[in-house]
Image (spheres, rainbow, N blue to C red):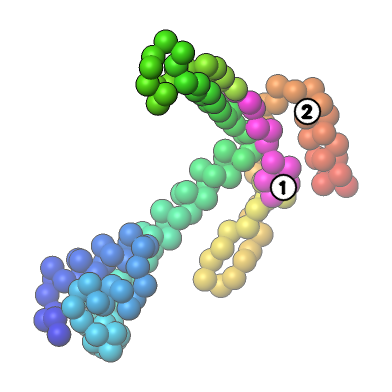
Amino acid sequence: MGKYTQKLVEKISGLIEEDNYTITEICRIAGISRNVFYEWKATKPEFSEALNQAFEAREERLRQQARRSMRQKLEGQKQIETKITYTASKDSDDPYTLVVKEYVVKEKYCLPETSAIIHSLSGGYNESKSGKQAMPASPLIIQVDSEKTKRDMERLQQRLSS
């Protein structure tokens, strides 16, 4: 069983922030039992505070990642696909020698997702410990290159406002 040290607290906090392990796995890595983990959490305020900070840091990182993903869905994105076709070389006696026959690069634009736009226009939700509360809608400016998408967004906004 591990002895309570500040170094061990930092190790456990770091593992919690990584968000790759369960409490059981963290205890196994730290060399303590789950009972000791929960006992320390209940009896040692500095351990409990370190755990809370680690959980908050992990949650903040997840919220940032969610905001980046939402922004990408709102703005749309370009995807580049590369396809390379090989054939056996006719100049070589070795049948395993390959030559590039075709090199195709496709660039496609993925349109913004309608569900992300609706969520953003309706104000989204701010999740807190007391439950979900509607956030006040903030003005949103989206620049669209396609006329059809622009018309669709205007119709969508009219439907949401009525």
Kindly identify the residue that appears in the image at 47 percent across and 49 percent down: 65
Label 1's element? helix
- Per the image, the residue denoted by label 1 is 115
Residue sitting at the far front: 93
Q: How many numbered marks have been drawn onto this rendered protein structure?
A: 2
**Between discs 2 and 1, the one toward the N terminus:** 1
Whether residue 49 is visible to the viewer of this picture, yes or no, is no
Residue type (three-letter) at the residue carrying disc 1? Ser
Residue type (three-letter) at the residue carrying disc 2? Lys
Kindly identify the residue that appears in the image at 28 percent across and 65 percent down: 15
Q: Position of residue 87 (x, y in %)?
A: 50, 21
Query: Position of 21 compared to 39: left or right?
Result: right
- Per the image, the residue denoted by label 2 is 150
Quadrant of the image occupied by residue 54: bottom left
The answer to the question of whether label 2 and label 1 lie on touching residues, with beta carbons closer than 8 A, is no
Characterize the local packing of mark 2: few (<14), some (14-19) or many (20 or more) Cα atoms within 10 angstroms: some
